[in-house]
Amino acid sequence: MLKVENLVVNYGVIQALKGISFEVNEGEVIALIGANGAGKTTTLQTISGMLSPNSGKVLLNDVDITTIPGHKIVSMGMAHVPEGRRVFPGLTVLENLKMGAYTRSNKTEIAKTLEQVYESFPRLKERQNQLAGTLSGGEQQMLAMGRALMSNPKIVLMDEPSMGLSPIYVDEIFKIIQSISDAGTTVLLVEQNAKKALAIADRAYVLETGNVVLSGDAKDLLNDDSIKKAYLGE
Amino acid sequence: MGFLTYLINGLSLGSVYAIIALGYTMVYGIAKMLNFAHGDVIMIGAYLVFMTMTGSGMPVVVSIVISIICCTALGMLIEKVAYKPLRKATNLAVLITAIGVSYFLQNMALLIFGSNPISFTSVITWQGITLAGGQLKITGVTIITIITCLIIMVALMWFVKNTKPGQAMRAVSEDRDAATLMGINVNGTISLTFAIGSGLAAIAGALLCSSYPVLTPYTGSMPGIKAFTAAVFGGIGSIPGALIGGLLLGIIENLAKAYISSQLADAIVFAVLIIVLLVKPTGILGKQTKEKV
């Protein structure tokens, strides 16, 4: 479904991605794990068109989207939940969710998706008229995820959804990611919480300073000694 | 009756400030920049009305529509040529460019129209109404100006709240990158904002010069600065703030001229602004969103 080929991204003189390649198949949950500065966020931003790569290709369903501007990618079936949630703080929860459906025009279908999002996130329905900036961190994360789902995506990119959340919310967020996957949506997950990410992922890629250094079945990686040492703190 | 006359004239002047302030406040809210060339678009708009109406004898409505269309195009052109290449530059670079565009427009007008003041023919021929047995006269220009301002405000607030491009504007003003992730064309939205602001500047130009009928290449610069002040006064980025800021500024200016000193009027206006900003740094309706991280 999503194919990344030899992606190179430079920030000035610094090479953030040094030619990474990976693949996400339909229905999979793929985790990208690695330390700070490994290039995880850069990878997601390049895929969704927020950054343009110096070389390499991004293919979505065999269509080359490398040079397609970011705002046109949503309607091709890809949504991105950005790092730091980035909800619209001055808009209400409902307005934020409607913004997620910006590219869609069929009102009855939007209403149907909204119903589904409210079903997955009852908390958002309770707070639908509250300004998003007044929500707690965990609620904002749910809103950011719900907002992404409003575009009815085939694949969702999630950047550090558990960052800065209390342990209870972390568990809840991972449960939600699992249920998004169960509903048939493909997930590309970037996480520092490698243990949780590997527990729900099908496969994973380990990034180190702009390179993929290891990849494989998530269960195998969970038991890999070098991974345990470097990322799982065991 | 004197006070009432001053108040109504103040409201009328304030309405013009408010229409101009809308251009500043919308561009600031959405593109996060101060477009100091905005005042000069007003001047271009007024010259266009003068040329088409007085010069070529076109009907008023046609000439105003032509002026609106040309100013809209000019605003979009300025944005594309001068500001868009600086999207990732520092704020200071954009600010200096805006000042440069302002001088460019003034000098271009100087070159085309010359420096001699033109006596502008009012776009409104209606004489107005007389109330209270002839003691209170309100001119047609005054009434039309106030009504136009109110219609524009209501229409714009409706547009921002209820239309798709309006929603896009709100999203871009909140978070440009997140708006892109929603599928919103940020460049297109910024361009639209300049288009609307500049189209309104054309209307403001026609109304301003109908009340104060002297047109020179520098006509736009002082009202531009005052309208910018009004936008800050009301809370920059806020559409109702531009209305309140503009009206208050117009009223304060006119009352100061009438009761204190016409020379000191501008100083008083800016003194009031400073006091307001000392008490409430975000302006009267300015928002301070508290974000939880």
Image (spheres, coloured by chain):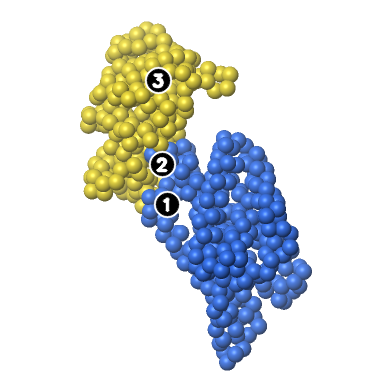
Q: Earlier in the sequence, mark 2 or mark 1?
A: 1
- Residue at image point 62% right, 37% down: B90
- Residue at image point 58% right, 19% down: A13
Residue found at the very far top of the displayed protein: A225
- Residue at image point 25% right, 23% down: A26
Q: Are marks 3 and 2 on the same chain?
A: no
Residue found at the very far front of the displayed protein: B56
What colour has chain B?
A: blue
Element marked by disc 2? loop
Pointer 1 residue: B166
Residue B32 visible? The answer is no
Q: State the image quarter where residue A203 is shown.
A: top left
Q: Position of residue B74 (x, y in %)?
A: 56, 50
Residue type at the position of mark 3: Lys
- Residue at image point 55% right, 42% down: B80
Give whichever of A183, B250 is nearer the camera.
Answer: B250
Pointer 3 residue: A57
Q: Is residue A37 above or below residue B131?
A: above
Q: Is residue B120 above or below residue B275?
A: below
The chain identifier of the residue carrying mark 1 reads B
What colour has chain A?
A: yellow
Q: Residues within 10 Å of mark 2 (few under 14, many from 20)?
A: many
Q: Residues within 10 Å of mark 3 (few under 14, many from 20)?
A: many
